[in-house]
Amino acid sequence: MKGVTAVAFVALSGCATVAEGNLAKPIDLGGHFLATPATASGLVVHGRELTFLSSPDFGVLEFTFENPTDHWIRIDQVHVDFGSPAANQGVTAIEGDDIAAWQIATEQRNAVRAANTQTALDVLALGASIGAARRHHGPARTAAVGIAVGAMMAGSAMAPSGQDLYPGDHLYAVPIAIPPGLFAKRWIVFNSDAAANRTCLGRATLDYDTSGRARERVVLDFRSSDGGSEWQAAACRAMYPTLSARTRNPG
């Protein structure tokens, strides 16, 4: 099954760096932070919210698993937790055909927004110079926006219902193999209901099992410092008038 690709996520974010977002800090199973940025297996994990894909009821997290070691690391099982039963209640990871529906709707919304932004820019530019408007905000830029949105959703057709729950680069599509000296990017979409949207989630705990090794756990503060996400926006503005990269889960 195909889906939103990690490569498209990187391209649309504007800068193709390996590890984007915040460092996910390793902790032991007792909840104590480790002294190094790497887990016991050697993985270094970063993560962030992809705010350009957010909407009031949906948030998208991206995780980058870096493997600086000289051996393969394979992840067998993955689970995301927001810190407490109260925080987890009403927040679900969408799957199957719901991912396809979300992809299509988000593509259409972003395309409409890009078109509306383009129109506004053209009108403003016309007041100064029709020629400048054509050079800087004309058809070429509109086409570029369309190509970017299309790339995000490339190959978004889902397998027949019931065959697969997650696209191949989804966080829950396991096993995840990270080659020596390289990395793997994975994403996950969360849907929160009205009750959950009254709480601003800013911290996630990622538990995963590695083949032949013990379970590992990392904690990620994922809220962006610019506060640009629409997901749970009202609650986040109330809880964190000035968001920072150190946003914590209030629950």
Image (cartoon, helix red, strand yellow):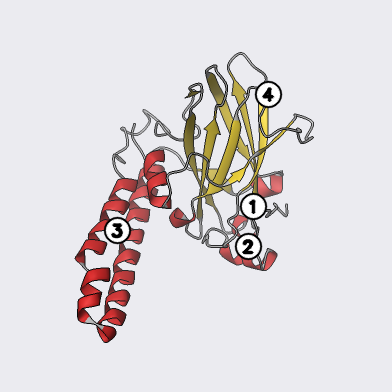
Q: Earlier in the sequence, mark 2 or mark 1?
A: 1
The residue labelled by disc 1 is 202
Q: Is residue 53 left or right of residue 134?
A: right
Which quadrant would residue 118 be assigned to in this image?
Answer: bottom left
SS type, badge 1: loop
Cβ atoms under marks 1 and 3 closer than 8 Å: no
Cβ atoms under marks 3 and 4 closer than 8 Å: no
Residue 13 shows in the view: yes
Q: What number of labels is visible? A: 4
Cβ atoms under marks 2 and 1 closer than 8 Å: yes
Q: CA distance from mark 1 to mark 4?
A: 25 Å
Q: Crowdedness of circle 1 by 10 Å Cα count: few (<14), some, many (20+)?
A: many
Q: Amino acid at mark 3?
A: Val
The residue labelled by disc 3 is 145
Q: Crowdedness of circle 2 by 10 Å Cα count: few (<14), some, many (20+)?
A: many
Which of the two marks, 4 or 2, is nearer to us in this view? 4
Residue 236 numbered tag: 2
Q: Earlier in the sequence, mark 1 or mark 4?
A: 4
Q: Nearer the viewer, residue 88 or 180?
A: 180
Q: CA distance from mark 2 to mark 1?
A: 9 Å
Q: CA distance from mark 3 to mark 4?
A: 42 Å
Q: Is residue 179 left or right of residue 153?
A: right
Q: Nearer the viewer, residue 72 or 106?
A: 72
Vertical comparison of 191 with 242: above or below: above
Cβ atoms under marks 1 and 4 closer than 8 Å: no
- For image coordinates 54% across by 31% down, the residue present is 66
Q: Earlier in the sequence, mark 3 or mark 2?
A: 3
Q: Earlier in the sequence, mark 3 or mark 4?
A: 4
Which quadrant would residue 244 be assigned to in this image?
Answer: bottom right
Q: Nearer the viewer, residue 9 or 18?
A: 18
| Residue 17, position as x, y percentages in the image | 47, 43
SS type, badge 3: helix
